[in-house]
Amino acid sequence: MGKEKILKDIQDIATDPFAYIKAKKVAGKKAIGSPLADVPAEMVHAAGFLPVTILGTNEPIVKAGAHLPDNACSLARSNLELVLNYRKDTFDGFVFPQVCDTTQHLSDIWRMTIPADFFASFLIPRQVDRKSAKTWFYRETLRLREQLSGFAGAPVTDAALRESFRFYNEVRALLRELYGHKRAFPGTISNREMFDLIRASLFMDPADLIPLLKAFKKEMTEEKEEKRLLPVVLSGIAVEPMQLLNILDDLGVNVVGDELIVGSRMIENDVSENGDPVEALTARHFAKSPYSPIRDRGTRLYDHLVTLVEQTRPAGVIYFHIKFCESQDYDLPDLKQVMREKEMPMIVLDTEYQSVTRAQTKTRLEAFVESLYGERENG
Amino acid sequence: MADVKPGMTAKDYSRQLTKAYYEGAKHARENGKFIAYTTAVSPAELFYAHDVIPIYPENHSVMMITHRMTAELSESIERKGYTSHLCAYARSDLGFRELHKSPIGGIPDPDFLLACNAQCFTLTKWFEVLARRYNVPLFVFDTPQFIRDKKAREEIITYVEEQIYEMIESLETLTGKKFDFDRLKEVLEYSRQASILYKTYLDMASYKPSPISIFDALINMAITVYLRGTPEAVQFYRLLVDEVMENKVKKGIGVIENEKYRLYWENLPIWFKFKDHFNFLASYGAVILSSLYVHAWSYDFDPSNPVRTLAENYASVFSNVEMEERAQMALDLFNRYSLNGNFMFLNRSCKAVSFAIHELRDIITEKTGIPALVFESDMGDPRFYSESQIRTRLEAYLETLDQLAFEKMRQF
């Protein structure tokens, strides 16, 4: 299989995972969906299910508007639309995390509106700066384990968990390697390709994905002549619609780092395959980089971007703001200030899952990238 | 603070307490005291027990809203990059910090911040902004949704209890003083008594005609919000309950004449409009009697087990339970107060209370058979309030109730 074919296979699933999920269901797997935010896929996988992260839809909102008002965040409305309307038969059950007011209420709406054989709230701590949060995460993960065991009809064993850890660790390691390659050899993997690879890992069984990633890795070459792409860092929660990444590719920029939730935060840490598996999942949760709705230690939310910028030395930062995400709304004015103090150019793009006209965003990005090129030449 | 002087009305006493409270806060530092900002639903008893003055930026924001200052304050921070979609309390408060405008000369800067997310998530982010601004510690008191699973509830309570001990450690670090658990029990006993009396006051809405409306409750709840844990709060509610009993209940005087419709209000009030709404509704023989919001401070404390009782009461507030349970809480008010109308306000400022309102309406309407009016506006920002549109909808709703009552009468 050549590079293009492998990539196409993965990208097809990353763009539209539902044919893949259906095939897994036909083969006897039950699909457990979870909206974004820190549900340990390993636990769902170890229980014998296919864990699927629900990442919204770009199709129009038809039914969700009757449940969530238009000032609810675009991701929440789009997730609800997906399961209420476009993909209502896909999931056998849900593990539902809560991180903010919107997700807390969405959990109620979901449980009361979407028929499913299984629904478990996963009440992750909304602070990670004190000891109590660790104890709570541990206990809540144990509770999830019990619930999944109940639905599976058999206990989730330590051995099964460690097996899942091995699978997911391998996926993460491969993705980190590929990201490293993209950073070292700009142009070998496009921005869209890299984030499609990460995205596919949120839908696919690692046993299916690992061979594809390995085959893809083999095709990687070390470009001798470095392409003159402008290095940038991405910040925010998710890049949606994904076509925005194509725009970045067209503009000649290379993403050298990111602190996106659907991005590096998914792949940056592994789970220890030794000791108490629930303890290991807890340790991984607390090693993750900050996430806007979760209260972190001191000013870590800001310091993290500063450190990333210092390490990767980009020409600029592109921040993706999900429309009506109030957590990001509160962060942004100070984050802009921090970047100004560091003399790091930053653009904030207001994105919406249902936004079909991207002309304005494209124009703004073009102007931003042009100004970065200008600064580079002058500086 | 102050005792009740002979002949003093509850209103006089409330004014005196409020004045003394803000004066005390103003001079806190001169008197060697620390100031903690906290959220309306939070274990504020810990502050009173440790001689730290709790200040509620939300209360201050209500004052700015009722003085119609929010649009100007909000615009000042919108220019700084904050959006007009955020909570009007937060926008008023952040605007106050830009323009230094306030109807009471402002509130002092904090030494410590406590944000309890049982009430909402917004507060934790708003206070995060303040924590950076003042470079002071922020303690997010995390209360996972109090789901209806017995085992989960036990674990949530344990997690919240652990955080109360962490909070105590933080207070000891702040002040350098050892925390006194006996004093906490004493403070909780005052909170317990004030809560019982406050609830007795709210329950006066069960009389027919009702001697109080929600608008009275909204004014009188302020004392329990910021002074629960003090003997003065107990004295105030005793005075208030006695006063309403003597002046209204015993004489059969209702808060409006010809009471016809006894209404439920879902959500916080439209603060800058509530007097107008009261007068407008009264002209139709309608009065809003209660809401879950005013009942959020009807706690049931057991001072003999202080940490546990704080955890149980603050984790289980209406805004932190599942929608089915919240509907049951609202239905309980419908039954106890014989309510026969339902206004459900979708408050753009408050996602925490407003989202899932349609699911809540469905349950309440199904169980009571009473139609509900769902309408959208903002509790604090007049730019999102359309007078003619809302009046028309309220009128149309009352006419529907009239029509339903007429048809019901005809059936007999």
Image (cartoon, grey):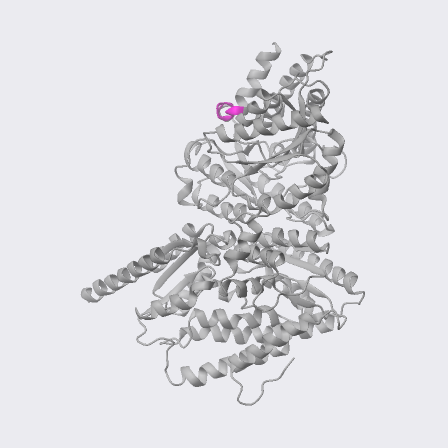
In front: A316, or A166? A316
Please tell me whether residue A328 belongs to the stretch shown in magenta. no
Residue B302 location (% of width, % of height)? 62, 70
Rendered-image quadrant of the N terminus of chain A: top right
Determine the image quadrant of residue A202.
top right
Outermost residue toward the top in this view: A2
Secondary structure predominantly adopted by residues drawn in magenta: helix
Residue B77 vertical placement versus A144 (above, below):
below
Count all numbered tags in the image, as a single digit.
Answer: 0
Question: Closer to the camera, B310 or A139?
Answer: B310
* Left or right side of B57 for B362: left
Magenta segment? A15-23
Residue in the picture at 45% in, 81% down? B244
Q: Is the C terminus of chain A in the top left, top right, bottom left or bottom right quadrant?
A: top right
Q: Is residue A121 among what the camera can see?
A: yes
Residue that sits furthest to the bottom in the current view:
B6
Q: Is residue B335 above or below residue A231?
A: below
Residue B62 locus on image (x, y percent): 53, 64
Where is residue B80? Give x, y as percent: 59, 48
Q: Is residue B122 left or right of residue A128?
A: left
Residue at the image position 65 percent from the left and 51 percent from the top:
B129
Q: Closer to the camera, A84 or B127?
A: B127
Please say whether residue A286 is visible from this viewpoint: no
Residue B241, x across and y down, in percent: 49, 80
Q: Is residue B243 left or right of residue A184?
A: left
Q: Looking at the image, which residue sits at the far right?
A: B176
Choose between B203 and B103: the one closer to the eye. Answer: B103
Residue visible at 59% across and 63% down?
B313
Q: Is residue B52 above or below residue A317?
A: below
Q: Is residue A82 left or right of residue A139?
A: left
Q: Name the residue at the front extreme.
A: A378
In the figure, residue B246 lies in which quadrant? bottom left
